[in-house]
Every structure is written in C-alpha cells, then in structure tokens.
Image: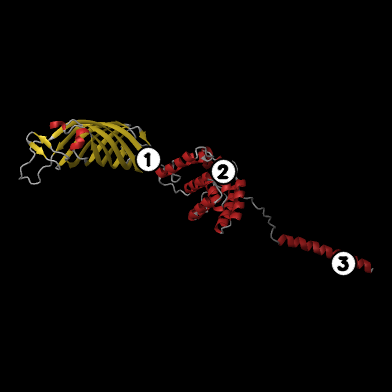
Amino acid sequence: MKIKFTFLNLLLMCTTTIFAQQDSSKTSAPVQVNFQTPLSHEQTIRNARAELEQAIRTDDPAWAALWVDSLRRLENENWLGLLWDERWMLYYWEGALGNLFEEAATANREMLTNTPRKKSINDDALFPLIDSTVLSRRFDLYNQIQSGFLNVEEKAFSVLLLDYLLRLNKDARDWAIRCNAFLKKFPESRYKAMVDYMNPYVYLPPASVTAPPKPNRKKGWSLDASLWTGRWTESAERTLDAPIGFDVGLSFWKRSRILGFRGGFGSRRLLQPIYDGNIEWPRGEKYNLGQFEAEWGYRIINTSKVKVYPVICAGLQWLTPPSPDDESVDDPYPGVNYTTFHYGATLNFDFKLKVQQAGKPGEHPAGSYVGARVRAGWKGLNWNAEDDVLVGNLFFLGVGVTTFAYRKVQ
C-alpha cells in the first residue's frame, strides 16, 4: 500500500511539472537568433587602412609593414589596397628602399596609368597622413639616402623619385633638366621607364602640366664690347706707337651664320713726324685711330662652355691728329686726315660664364648666355702718306664681355 502511494505521488509531480512548463512557454518572449553579416571587401580594406593609419601615428614601422602586406593580399581585379604612390612613400618611411627599387625597376607607363581603373579608397585620412609625415622628414630621408649603402645611380634615383612623390617638381623646366641629367648620366638605367614617365610632367595637379617651351635656335643676336691693343708692321711700326683702344660690336645670327657691324676707337703717340705738304705732325704728338666695319662669319665650334667662330671684315679706318681743346684756337693740322679702306680677318672665342638653361614664354630660350670674349685678328691697311711712313698692317688682340641670345619664345 505504501509503495502504491509513493508511485502515485511521483506521477502527479511529473504531470504538474509538464503543464507548468507549457504554461510558462506561452507567456515567455520568443528566442531571437542573430547571424553576423560578413564584411564587404571594401569594408575589409577600409579596416586594414585604418589599422595602417594607426601604426603610422604611433610610429611603428614593423606593425605598418604587416598591414601593408595585408593590403597587398586584399587586392584583386576590382580593388586596390594601396595606390602605388602611397605604397612607395611608405617604403621611404619604413626605410625599405630595396622593395622600392624592385617595384620601380619593373614599373611601366601602362601599370602607372591603368591603376585608376581599379577601385580604391581615397576618402580616408591615410594619404594625407603619409604625405605630411614623409614631407616633414624629407631632409632626414635625404641624409639617409646619401649615407646609405647605395650606389650612385640608386642615390640619384631615390632623391629624384622622392621629390616627385612629394610633388616638389612644380617648376617644369627645372624638373625636365633634372630628369634629362639623370638619363644622360645613366643611359642604361633600370629605372629609365619610371624617369621617362616622370619627365617632363608635373605630378599634381594635372591642370598645371606644362612642357618646357621648344627653343627657337634659328635666329639670335649678340652684343659685345672689348678693350684691345695691337702692333703695326713695316714702316708704320716705326711711325706709330702700338695702339690701345676699345670697340663695340652688334651681330645677327641665323643658325651658324653671322652678319655683324663694329665700331672702335684707339689712340697712342707718334714715334716720328709725319709730313702732309707743308704741315708737320710732330713726333710725340697724339694720334686718333677710328674704324667702322662689317663682318661676315660662320660658327665652327659651339659647346656648353665655349663658342668659336671666324669672321672676315671690311670697312673704313682713319688716322687723324687731335683736335684743339679750345675751339677759338685754329686747328694746327688743317686737312690732315688719313682715311683708307681696310679688310681683315678675326678669330673670336666666347667663353660662356652664365648659360640660360631653359626659357619660359617671353624669355630667351636655352642656349642664351653671358660670357667673356677674346678676339685675335689682322687688318690690312692702305694709307697714303709722304715717304711711305704709314705702310703696314695691324695685328691686334682684344678681351671683353659679350651677351648672346636666341630669339625669344612666344
């Protein structure tokens, strides 16, 4: 009897429990199951770039290198993790110039220009942060490059590329000169394709891209002034002391040909008297020597340092006594004037001291210069004087300054 009672109590307890659970399930809130939505590829790249940005802010190159590698792995046919200029500036910041050289050596115009066809993140703070960080450290980077274990070509290319990435190439003329100088010094450089891509365009903004104006080397002009001294030959050497004077020349160039005009003045004293009829021009008196001539020549040498060109000349040369200082005094040598047609030849040497490298519109183009001029020549004279005391020629040497300019760029 006791066993039956216990069994009935147990059965009643189980029944009560079952019904109680059913009632509670009716009144309790429904169970919600949440499934986490996977991140899009764009958001994954954004998160990685945010981590890279934080690594740069904390100045942790090792941690940044891991995120750069992650972003490289996230790239596909549609998305870029980092633009090539962002990645290369990070190489400078990390000191990973070996990676930079390998990528720059294999870079080509198609790769560099086709990059924008893929999607990239350009609305975050990563690029401005990299740009400002590298820009603020550029002088330290220059020193590291020069003191690093790099060859001459790698050092030159590193500095050139760094200035390009930081957009320090605003002056298109100077930038083209730097790029051309690199290619001239390293014509077989493995970075030639990259330097060709950088030359002569300004990196940013595209609207400011200008190529250096093409110089007009067909026409030009030159102006010179020089001091000269000479030596007479034959009887003129015994009559006239060696002259000292100055002259000024203006020349017009067309390619290598030259047409010029020159005027000059010289003076010294007589070594023996000259007689003109009853008039004596006594020994020790001063004489004046004037000339005006036209020149024709051809340039035979023209380098970055020197220009050489010979000319032949023809014109008038006159020898006169001095005029009295007081106009009220009669001229003691009335009518004494020895004028003759002369011809000659001159060899001109222009040593270029300051050369115009390139010209903007309105300026003289590349090749214009200021320099020193040395002139050496001979003039054949035909003065008529009694007793043939003025027979002879003149050899001279002059030194002065000159300026040469091509026609201005329009």
Query: Of label 1 and label 3, which has the lower sequence position?
Result: 3
In the rendered image, residue 252, in percent from the top left (x then y), is placed at 27, 34
Quadrant that contains the C terminus: top left
Instruction: Classify 53 as above or below 341.
Output: below
Residue 246 falls left or right of residue 359 = left
- Given contact means CB atoms under 8 Å apart, are the residues at marks 2 and 1 in contact? no
- Amino acid type, callout 1: Lys
In the rendered image, residue 305, in percent from the top left (x then y), is placed at 37, 40
- Secondary structure of the residue carrying tag 3 is helix
Q: Which residue is mark 1?
A: 305
In the rendered image, residue 92, in percent from the top left (x then y), is placed at 54, 51
Mark in front: 1 vs 3: 1
- Secondary structure of the residue carrying tag 1 is loop
Residue occupying image coordinates x 12% and y 32%: 386
Q: Which residue is mark 2?
A: 103
Alpha-carbon span between mark 2 and mark 3? 85 Å
Residue occupying image coordinates x 48% and y 40%: 185
